[in-house]
C-alpha cells in the first residue's frame, strides 16, 4: 500500500443569496440557499460557478447542519462540470446564532467539511470524475469558500 494523502486541487468561491426558509419538518429544519455565481481557481482547475444551483441545508435538532449542494461550474475552456457536494457543519450554539445574525465568524470556531463529487465529460477534465475529493469549507453571509483536495 502507498498510503493516503491530500493534494490541494482548487478553491471554489460560491456567492450565495438569502436563504429560503422551509421551516421545521419531521427530519429537521430545511433551508435552501441559492448559489448565484462565483469563481474557481487553483493549480488543477479554473473557471466560474454558474448561477442557478442551491445548497439544501437540513438543520438538525442539535442546531448543526447536514448540507447538500447541487450546482455547476464552467471551466475556463467552457466545459460544464456538475457538482454534488455533501457536507457537515458543526458549531456551538453561540457561533450558529452569530452566523444567523449575519456576522462573520472565524473558521476555527466551527467544523465545516464536505465531500464533493464531480460529473465531468471525457477530455481534459475527466479526471474529476475519476477521483475522490474532500474539502475544507468557510462560510460568510455572502459566500461559501470550498478548498478542494484530491485524495491521492
Image (cartoon, rainbow, N blue to C red):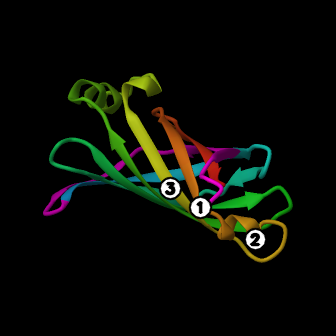
Instruction: From the image, state whether disc 1 or disc 3 is nearer to you.
Output: 1
Image marks 1 and 3: residues in contact by CB distance under 8 Å: yes
Work out whether mark 1 precedes mark 3 in sequence or the reverse, and give the earlier one.
3
**Relative to 44, is 91 on the left or the right?**
left
Front position in the image: 22 or 104 = 104
Q: Which residue is mark 1?
A: 132
Is 90 in front, or is 18?
A: 90
Can you identify the residue that label 3 sits on?
Answer: 115
Residue 115 is inside the magenta segment:
no
Residue 100's label in the rendered image is none
- Residue found at x 30% / y 47%: 65
- Residue at image coords 26%, 28%: 97
What whole-number distance in Å separates the C-alpha atoms at marks 1 and 3? 8 Å
Spot occupied by residue 84 in the image (x, y as percentages of width and height): 52, 64
Residue 54 location, x and y as percent?
47, 58
**Above or below: residue 131 compared with residue 141:** below
Whichever of labels 1 and 2 marks the residue nearer the N terminus, that label is 2
C-alpha span from label 3 to label 2: 18 Å
Q: Residues within 10 Å of mark 1 (few under 14, many from 20)?
A: some
Left or right, 111 with respect to 118, comes to left
Looking at the magenta stretch, what is its main secondary structure? Answer: strand
Query: Circle 2 is placed at which residue position?
Result: 126
Identify which residue is drawn at 45% across, 22% down.
106
Dot 3 lies on which element? strand
- Disc 1/disc 2 C-alpha distance (Å): 13 Å
Residue 113 in percent (x, y) is at: 45, 45
Image position of 18 (left or right of 74): left
Of badges 1 and 2, nearer the viewer stands 1
Span highlighted in magenta in the image: 1-27
Sort mark 2 into few (<14), some (14-19) or many (20+) by Cα contacts within 10 Å: some
Left/right placement of residue 98 relative to residue 75 reads left
Amino acid at each position: 500500500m502507498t498510503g493516503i494523502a491530500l493534494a490541494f486541487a482548487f478553491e471554489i468561491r460560491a456567492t450565495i443569496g438569502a436563504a429560503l426558509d422551509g421551516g421545521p419538518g419531521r427530519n429537521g429544519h430545511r433551508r435552501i440557499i441559492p448559489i448565484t455565481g462565483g469563481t474557481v481557481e487553483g493549480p488543477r482547475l479554473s473557471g466560474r460557478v454558474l448561477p442557478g444551483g442551491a445548497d439544501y441545508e437540513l438543520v438538525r435538532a442539535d442546531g448543526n447542519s447536514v448540507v447538500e449542494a447541487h450546482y455547476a461550474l464552467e471551466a475556463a475552456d467552457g466545459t460544464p462540470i456538475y457538482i454534488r457536494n455533501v457536507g457537515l457543519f458543526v458549531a456551538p450554539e453561540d457561533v450558529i446564532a452569530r452566523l444567523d445574525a449575519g456576522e462573520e465568524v472565524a473558521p476555527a470556531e466551527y467544523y465545516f467539511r464536505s465531500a464533493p463529487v464531480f460529473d465531468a465529460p471525457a477530455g481534459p477534465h475527466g479526471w474529476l470524475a475519476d477521483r475522490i475529493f474532500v474539502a475544507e469549507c468557510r462560510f460568510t453571509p455572502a459566500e461559501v469558500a470550498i478548498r478542494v483536495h484530491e485524495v491521492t
